[in-house]
Amino acid sequence: MPDHDYDLFVIGGGSGGVRAGRLAAAMGKRVAIAEEYRFGGTCVIRGCVPKKLFVYASQFSEHFEDAGGYGWSVSGTSFDWPTLIANKDREIARLEGLYRKGLENAGAYILESRAELVDAHTVRIVAEDRSVTAGMILIATGGRPNPHAALPGHEHCITSNEAFHLETLPKSIIIAGGGYIAVEFANIFHGLGVDTTLVYRGKEILQRFDMDLRSGLHEAMEAKGIRILCHTIFDRIERRADGRLDAHLSNGDTLAADQVMLALGRTPNTEGLGLDRAGVETGKADEIVVDDYSRTSVDNIYAIGDVTNRVQLTPVAIHEAMCFVDTVFRDRPTSPDHDCIATAVFSQPEIGTVGLTEDDACKRHREIEIYRASFRPMRHTLSGRQEKMMMKLVVEAASRKVLGAHILGPDAGEMAQILAIPIKAGLTKDDFDRTMAVHPSAAEELVTMYQPSYRVKDGERV
């Protein structure tokens, strides 16, 4: 590499940027990493981690209800929102400290500042009003919630960012969106006792998930008391004199709530980075365009994670970071593998999924077999809760290869992570059938569905 101040300069201290910076520094490379807010990025600071803590908190209302069936007498329960916020903030601060410590121990130089490109090898440290040069530059600035600026009254709304820092828990909330963020927060707020309405423009929530999961979760959420309005959008949001909000809907209705939340997608953080000065190409959604190895249109500048708008998941950004280090510093060109990624939606009930949906499998294969089971899990039998669990395997008829697995119910995300291994490895339904069951468990259904529920040939059930 030419003589520069650093071998690698990382812009962005989220999961992907930190992993790349830490690995490269541990190899003895001169690494600097700049972050203008807090290390940990969306996942740790305002995403996956605090969201999962909120999910846990929201589940206790049902746990208390179910306890009676098991002989427990639970009375006098109450919930304190400020306590949850304070405890969450303490845990986030602890995790951020671990991210910093990992970088420091590896020998990376940390810059608490915004960083902008001056040219292909020069980066300006905004807080210090100085510039440095680097042989390689990695952009890992992530994304942010789409503010939906075209919506009149959008300035009165919150996003997932603000939801983690509300001073008081609202009594009512309306959430716009049908993706996993909207669905998860609808369940969180409802579980904490908030009157919750979900408004979505599509015909069913959770687009791109298997339809059985989508319709099953929709039914379960409505049974809990969450209102879901599909084929509906906001026309405008107005603030009342008393501080509450009126959401005017496309169907002519007006709903009032204490808070309105927009969960309408995310936007890559590329604005003001100086990409044009360096010659870095961006796409229609302002994402950074990269090749199979995460290289941008400039040879020495790479980009990973949500800023590339490929697959917006934390483990994917981390995987892309590791591939980047292999490609650039270990002379082992490695392209990220985005096929067959396990995903969880921490709704209530939970979703875990990996591989092809039934609809996608029908488009790719002439004949498939569907193995499907719906049952009340054992944990609900004494509590009296009627909520069903659903498990589904999508299998190619000719090869018997398991193409996808989809679960709705308790611990579905945990099961999806384990199922990702055999499905990624290309195992067959016969391999599943030869596997002994763990009894009694819900997961045993995955290896005891011996006969297909139905077959689909040329797109038609047979």
Image (cartoon, rainbow, N blue to C red):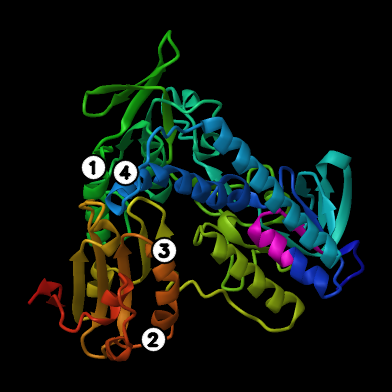
Query: Does the magenta segment cover residue 14?
Result: yes
Q: CA distance from mark 1 to mark 3?
A: 21 Å
- Can residue 441 be seen in the rendering of this structure? yes
Left/right placement of residue 1 relative to residue 309 reads right
Q: CA distance from mark 4 to mark 3?
A: 23 Å
Residue occupying the point 53% across, 52% down: 48
Residue 57: x and y, percent? 47, 44
Camera-side mark, 1 or 4 = 4
Callout 2, which amino acid? Gly
Disc 4 crowd, CA 10 A, few/some/many (<14, 14-19, 20+): some
Mark found first going from the N terminus, 1 or 2 = 1
Q: Which residues are magenta?
A: 8-20
Q: Which residue is mark 4?
A: 65
Mark found first going from the N terminus, 3 or 2 = 3
Q: CA distance from mark 2 to mark 4?
A: 42 Å
Q: Which residue is mark 3?
A: 413
Mark found first going from the N terminus, 2 or 4 = 4
Callout 3, which amino acid? Gly
The answer to whether the residue labelled 3 contacts the one labelled 2, judged by CB atoms less than 8 Å apart, is no
The answer to whether the residue labelled 2 contacts the one labelled 4, judged by CB atoms less than 8 Å apart, is no
Element under disc 1 = helix
Residue 141: x and y, percent? 65, 52
Which label number is shown at residue 426?
Answer: 2
